[in-house]
Amino acid sequence: GQQLNQSPQSMFIQEGEDVSMNCTSSSIFNTWLWYKQDPGEGPVLLIALYKAGELTSNGRLTAQFGITRKDSFLNISASIPSDVGIYFCAGPISGGGADGLTFGKGTHLIIQP
Amino acid sequence: EAGVTQSPTHLIKTRGQQATLRCSPISGHTSVYWYQQALGLGLQFLLWYDEGEERNRGNFPPRFSGRQFPNYSSELNVNALELEDSALYLCASSPRGYEQYFGPGTRLTVT
């Protein structure tokens, strides 16, 4: 099946800093999704991307669908304590179309006081 | 609008028993997906149901099964439980698109 490589695995940042993380695949995706998961809870959908080159924002979060369709990026500006959590990228197992999702292993975001 | 709900929150079973987990999708969503999140293994796709039919399944043995009811709610059954089945089981629903919305999960512990 599709493998998603997410980096970095973890990030230790100061409050107020900007954050960047990315996700790559060996195969083409037609959809990229970004989720955030807090401990003991289900993932929450942050941003959905459907078109190569697309740049979409949700508040302080901005995500981009790479033009090769094999990567995606998530940026968080001016981080705040509630941004702490695990961020996952995901895409349809089949590469396109409604289907189960394959997930990256996540980026743990830790904000140092 | 109510989100995806799952029950029970926690479930403790012994090896060899059967577990039944339940999920109610967001109103208007017809697709339900099940995922397993085991420690160290990440989120793995288990099953996809749409309009009462199983549409796809992940790389899991047949003792993982389920069904979707006419009201679009769903049940996941795990037979002959093994210790490695201990995990957070997550249900997600989708309005026949690509975006999936997750519930809080059921924590299954097998002893």
Image (cartoon, helix red, strand yellow):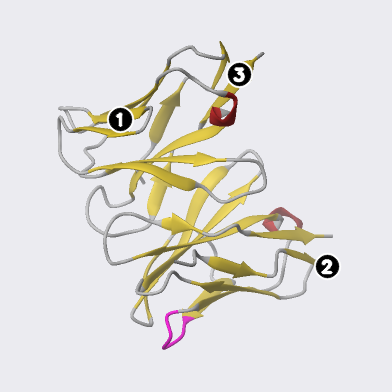
Q: Are marks 1 and 3 on the same chain?
A: yes
Helix, strand or loop: magenta stretch: loop
Callout 2 crowding tier (Cα within 10 Å): few <14, some 14–19, many ≥20: some
| Residue bearing mark 2 | B14
Judged from this view, the residue extending furthest toward the bottom is: B70
Q: Amino acid at mark 3?
A: Ile
User: Residue A45: image x %, image y %?
Assistant: 42, 46
Q: Is residue B29 magenta?
A: no
- Disc 1 designates what residue? A63
**Residue identifier under label 3:** A111
Q: Which chain does the numbered disc 2 sit on?
A: B
Q: Secondary structure at mark 3?
A: strand
Describe the element under mark 1 as helix, strand or loop. Answer: strand
Q: Are marks 1 and 3 in contact (CB under 8 Å)?
A: no
Q: Give the class, few, some or many, for how many residues have Cα within 10 Å of label 1's Cα (few <14, many ≥20).
A: many
**Which contiguous range is marked in magenta?**
B68-72
> Which of the 4 quarters of the picture holds residue B26?
bottom left
Residue A63 spot, x, y in % from top left: 30, 30
Q: Residue at x 33, y 80 (%)?
A: B51
Q: Work out how far the residue at label 2 is from the one at label 1, CA to CA, in angstroms.
A: 43 Å
Q: Are marks 2 and 3 on the same chain?
A: no
Identity, as a three-letter code, of the amino acid under mark 2 = Thr
